[in-house]
Amino acid sequence: MTERLYFRQLLSGRDFAVGDPVGTQMVNFVYLVGDRETGEAVVVDPAYKVDDLLALVAADGMRLTGALVSHYHADHVGGSAFGIEIEGIRELLTRVHVPIHVNRAEAEWVRRATEVSAADLVEHDDADVVTVGEIPIQLLHTPG
């Protein structure tokens, strides 16, 4: 029997964004979480090489149905950091239109950092639950 929960932890510069100098230096984690039975998945903090992340989702036989944002820093959502442009949710939305789930306290900062529309963001409160297929993900806001 196959585990229903789909989960991958990806390290920038190793598992994706290979050769990207910022992604390799920052070595951030990105997570894929989903439901193997429905084939639905979300990506947590999609920064650096968006096409690499989408290719990994597709290679696993999954389809992206959303993104979760932990906070507004460019190395987690994309945007400009120290004069360097980093791919993120803005580029993700040009490839696949999915809801971007964000804590209500972070929403304005995410919009400013990425220049995405408020209509692209789904604002949540602490302890809200986002369901991917039949997999519940409880959101925990941990600022700082």
Image (cartoon, helix red, strand yellow):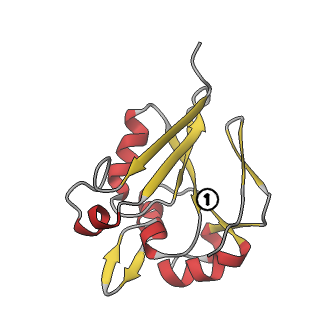
Q: Position of residue 97 (x, y in %)?
A: 53, 57
Q: Which of 119 and 53 is in front in this view?
A: 53
Q: Going by the image, does 56 lie left or right of 139?
A: left
Which residue shows up at 35% across the image and 44% down it? 55
Q: Nearer the viewer, residue 26 or 139?
A: 26
Which residue shows up at 42% across the image and 70% down it? 75
Which residue shows up at 57% across the image and 29% down it? 36
Q: Position of residue 135 (x, y in %)?
A: 69, 37
Task: Work out which residue is located at the far left of the displayed protein and give it.
Answer: 19
The quarter of the rendered structure image containing the C terminus is bottom right
Residue 71, picture quadrant: bottom right
Q: Which of 117 and 105 is in front in this view?
A: 105
In the rendered view, tell whether residue 101 sits above or below residue 14.
Answer: below
Q: Residues within 10 Å of mark 1 (few under 14, many from 20)?
A: some
Q: Where is residue 66 in the image (x, y as percent from the top left)?
A: 58, 53
- Count of numbered circles in the view: 1
Q: Going by the image, does 63 lie left or right of 130?
A: left
Which residue corresponds to mark 1? 99
Question: Which element carries disc 1, helix, strand or loop?
Answer: loop
In the rendered view, tell whether residue 76 sits above or below residue 118.
Answer: above
In the rendered view, tell whether residue 58 sits above or below residue 27.
Answer: above
Q: Where is residue 53 in the image (x, y as percent from the top left)?
A: 39, 50
The quarter of the rendered structure image containing the N terminus is top right
In the rendered view, tell whether residue 121 sits above or below residue 37.
Answer: below
Q: Which amino acid does label 1 sit on?
A: Pro
Task: Work out which residue is located at the far front of the displayed protein and give it.
Answer: 144
